[in-house]
Amino acid sequence: MSAPAAPGDDSIDDLRRRIAACTLCAAHLPLGPRPITRFSPTARVLIIGQAPGTRVHASGVPWDDDSGDRLRGWLSIDKPLFYDEARVAQMPIGFCYPGKAAGGDAPPRRECAPRWHEAVLAHLPAERLTLLVGAHAQARYLPETKGWSSPERVRAFGQFGNRTALPHPAWRARLWMARHPWFEADILPPLRARIAAALARVGDT
């Protein structure tokens, strides 16, 4: 398989086509490859999650499940805005459903982010708000927090510039929120304000 083009070498449409045709991990994917990501050069909010689940794999729509409903509630973003790729980009750590493991889905494939992320990021605005949803996204994009717990990363809101850590919004998040009531009281209101401010800049040069 040929090496990927360097970041910036692809037009955005070429990059989308190359991602859609990727078979790098095909031998390891129980449902086969179906890369799922959305991005545009105007998106001021970037959501980096883990990997698609089975429902998202089936529909081809990112966060098209209960976790997505919970995430949209946290962010106070309705579906039309959430799925407007001119405003909100979606780039998981692994673009395809990775299969099952003990206790839930397997971790995202390690090959995906090194191959594609830099190329996608090269097409996004430099001034953007990046939401790092779950431990896998935070491990890659908050390396300075190695060894921190999930609550420590989330509670450090505002300390990472335009990067923000969020817990994964799976069903277990209800238990997480019950143990950490400060998340809803102290983190979500200013986060929503930052998102609104970022989205208001869409179209700015």
Image (cartoon, rainbow, N blue to C red):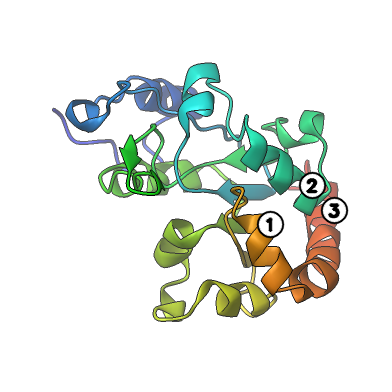
- 63 sits left or right of 99 in the view: right
Q: Name the residue under label 2.
A: 73
SS class of the residue under badge 3? helix
| Three-letter residue code for mark 1 | Arg
Dot 1 surroundings within 10 Å: few (below 14), some, or many (20 or more)? few
Percent coordinates x, y for residue 13 in the rendering: 48, 23
Residue 82 appears in the figure:
yes
Asked whether 119 or 67 is in front, the reply is 67
Does label 3 or label 1 sit earlier along the sequence?
1
Percent coordinates x, y for residue 165 in the rendering: 60, 66
SS class of the residue under badge 2? helix
| Three-letter residue code for mark 2 | Gly
Residue 24 appears in the figure:
no
Q: Residue at left 77%, top 76%? A: 182
Asked whether 161 or 202 is in front, the reply is 161
How far apart marks 3 and 1 lie (CA) works out to 25 Å
Percent coordinates x, y for residue 134 in the rendering: 52, 58
SS class of the residue under badge 1? helix
Q: Are marks 3 and 1 in contact (CB under 8 Å)?
A: no
Q: Mark 1 points at which residue?
A: 174
In front: mark 2 or mark 1?
1
Q: Do the residues labelled 3 and 2 touch (CB within 8 Å)?
A: no
How far apart marks 2 and 1 lie (CA) works out to 13 Å
Dot 3 surroundings within 10 Å: few (below 14), some, or many (20 or more)? some
Q: Name the residue under label 3.
A: 196
Q: How many numbered marks, from 0 up?
A: 3
Residue 3 quadrant? top left
In front: mark 3 or mark 1?
1
How far apart marks 3 and 2 lie (CA) works out to 14 Å
Does label 2 or label 1 sit earlier along the sequence?
2
